[in-house]
Amino acid sequence: MPLRLLADENFPASSVALLRQQRMDVKYIAEIFPAYADIDVLALAVEEQRVLLTFDSDFGKLVFFHGRQPPPAIVYFRFELLSATEPAEVFLHLLENTTIELDGMMNVVTRTLVRKSPFPPPSRP
């Protein structure tokens, strides 16, 4: 199954374009639901089973501290941009080198490392 991605509104449009040029299935919040609340972005990623690409730490908080259902994975980029295509370039590099896990993980990506944390088990009612 091809990799399905959901780029948060704060993800640069040039990076979305670069990922699409690589034939990745990318939905972009800025194009489909501008100003969507984080909780709704997370719900869309879960509903459509898309890996969430973001520069916003709030998604980790929603999953780890507020018990929200996680998407297949979250990739949280934690660095200042040098260019608008840099996040896509970093992501593609990580995919090629298998230093990122996209199954049940929160990946915090800096320029020098990827910190991976498994999502908590679903809470029981």
Image (cartoon, helix red, strand yellow):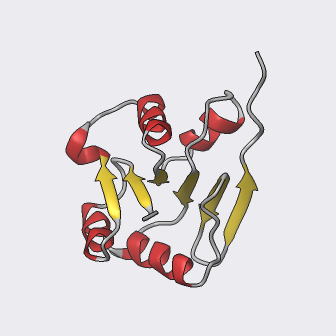
From the top left corner, tell me how far across and down residue 78 is, in percent.
55, 61
Residue furthest top in the image? 125
The C terminus - image quarter: top right
Q: In the image, is 74 to the left or to the right of 84?
A: right
Q: In the image, is 54 to the left or to the right of 84?
A: right
From the top left corner, tell me how far across and down residue 59 is, in percent.
55, 41
Count of numbered circles on the image:
0
Residue furthest left in the image? 31
Q: Which image quadrant for residue 88?
A: bottom left
Q: Is 45 drawn above or below residue 14 in the view shown?
A: above
Q: Which image quadrant for residue 113?
A: bottom right
Q: Residue at x 64, y 65 (%)?
A: 101
- Looking at the picture, tell me which residue is in the foreground, 104 or 74: 104
- Looking at the picture, tell me which residue is in the foreground, 75 or 79: 75
From the top left corner, tell me how far across and down residue 92 is, in percent.
46, 77
Q: Residue at x 62, y 43 (%)?
A: 60
Q: Residue at x 33, y 74 (%)?
A: 85
Residue 58 appears in the figure? yes
Q: In the image, is 118 to the left or to the right of 38?
A: right
Q: Is 83 drawn above or below residue 11 in the view shown?
A: below
Q: Is 98 drawn above or below residue 56 in the view shown?
A: below
Residue furthest front in the image? 1
Q: In the image, is 19 to the left or to the right of 38?
A: left
Q: Residue at x 64, y 36 (%)?
A: 63
From the top left corner, tell me how far across and down residue 49 is, in percent.
48, 46
Residue 82 appears in the figure? no
Q: Which image quadrant for residue 71?
A: top right
- Looking at the picture, tell me which residue is in the foreground, 20 or 88: 20
